[in-house]
Amino acid sequence: MAFKNLRPGGRLIVEPQGFNTYWKRAKTVDELRETYNKIEFKPEQFKDYLLNEIGFVSFEELGMPQANAKGFERPLQVFRKEVYKGENRKKVKKNF
């Protein structure tokens, strides 16, 4: 839904949480553990899915922002929608 609402050249910014951090909470509650074990679409799959299935044309990973709590220091990922139809997909860019 976010992709359709973005204007041409619009950007989606995400801060995916590592899948291993879900386990910390899931192991404390039975219902969450069951849900955790059923998860098939994991954060490390987001990039390929958004680029290859949804239609974003570029990806950039920004450095980790400084946070007061260590658990919130995760890299930001920026996905860009094409500016015009038929725009060539750009290679993945990483900035650290």
Image (tube, helix red, strand yellow):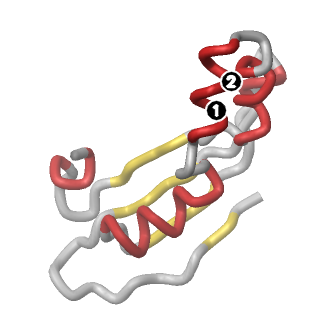
**Element type at marker 1?**
helix
Picture coordinates of residue 82, whole percent (x, y): 27, 72
Check whether the beta carbons of the residues at disc 1 and disc 2 lie within 8 A of each other. yes
Is 76 placed above or below 87 here?
A: above
Residue in view at x 25 percent, y 54 percent: 3
Picture coordinates of residue 17, whole percent (x, y): 66, 37
Q: Work out whether residue 7 or residue 53 is closer to the camera in this orientation and state it.
A: 53
Residue in view at x 61 percent, y 49 percent: 43
Is 17 placed above or below 49 here?
A: above
- Pointer 2 local density, CA inside 10 Å: few below 14, some 14–19, many at least 20: some
**Residue 61 image label:** none
- Pointer 1 local density, CA inside 10 Å: few below 14, some 14–19, many at least 20: some
> Residue 53 sits in which quadrant?
bottom left
Residue in view at x 77 percent, y 58 percent: 96
Residue in view at x 62 percent, y 72 percent: 93
Q: Which residue is mark 2?
A: 33
**Element type at marker 2?**
helix
Badge 2 amino acid: Arg
